[in-house]
Image: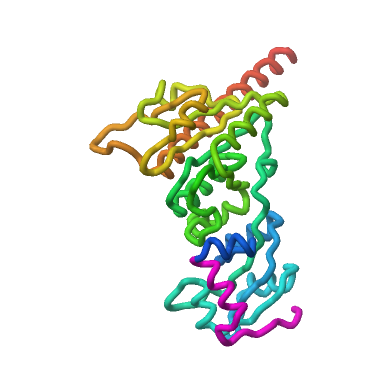
Amino acid sequence: MLAAQRISSRNARFQQWESFLTNRNKRTRARQFLVQGVRPISLAVEHGWTVRTLIYDAQRPLSRWAEDLLGTAKAERVAMAPGLLADLGEKTEDAPEVVAVVDMPDDDLARITVGEDFLGVAFDRPTSPGNIGSIIRSADAFGAHGLIVAGHAADVYDPKTVRASTGSLFAVPSVRVPAHRDVVAWTRAERAQGTPVVIVGTDEHGDCDVFDFDFTRPTLLVIGNETSGLSNAWREACDHLVRIPMGGAASSLNAANAATAVLYEISRQRIAAHRHATDRHTIHRQAASR
């Protein structure tokens, strides 16, 4: 392992990293954010994100995972006093073993791959970083190709977002855009290139129930703001609006829960369609061999 810099006081570098926890402007200017945890850091490395610095506990023995990470990752190494490392990990007791300083990628919609099986999620002006992280996690679980955060919104790289995504942030491209019109223009460009992406919004007054809509085609699912739902501009941009049928006393679902419910239904439809196509192909092949 290469020699590491040692930090035992709240010097300028420490203060800059600490500011990334609470100051969005400083994160954005530096184009860096903090990551902790075995799975998130491992996924960041696995998916090729630029890990700029690895900060580890200067006093305790390292686990095999941390030793392997520090020995193989192409990143600066900093040995830090445990109390300071606990501050970066936002913990009052045990310090995390490793905190990574990771570069932000460009907010470029080209990072999201659009093909015949495309599934994307657009989140309209979300206010909760936890909801963004939870939707990224669900998008990853159910096969989405990317998340778009549109309009004035919470930050994709807020520590709460990063934690709630449980590492899926590094597997699912998550792109910030200024307004819905940027997404609409991108969708039109993809259509012009031959991929018939349909924009589907979720709304309690939707045209049909979610399980009655055909989600097997290329789809951009739009989730509304937690308080006000879809903006009028998004409603006009959507090709269809679908609703989640509900019973009980609940009048609505949390945005992340609603997104998860619809993503599950999309995944279910696509798996069923794939199985049906496979079974049909098998029957035809068996018939031809007789």
Q: Residue at x 74, y 15 (%)?
A: 289
- In the displayed orientation, state which residue is furthest to the left: 249
Q: Is residue 209 above or below residue 84?
A: above
Image-quadrant location for residue 34: bottom right
In this orientation, which residue lies closer to the viewer: 74 or 157?
Answer: 157
Q: Residue at x 41, y 21 (%)?
A: 207
Q: Residue at x 25, y 35 (%)?
A: 248
Residue 41 at x, y percent in the picture: 61, 63
Magenta stretch: residue 4 in it?
yes
**Residue range corresponding to the magenta coloring:** 1-22
In this orientation, which residue lies closer to the viewer: 48 or 121?
Answer: 121
Residue 91 at x, y percent in the picture: 45, 73
Could you tell me how many numbered marks the image carries?
0
Magenta stretch: residue 228 in it?
no
The quarter of the picture where the C terminus appears is top right
Residue 69 at x, y percent in the picture: 68, 69
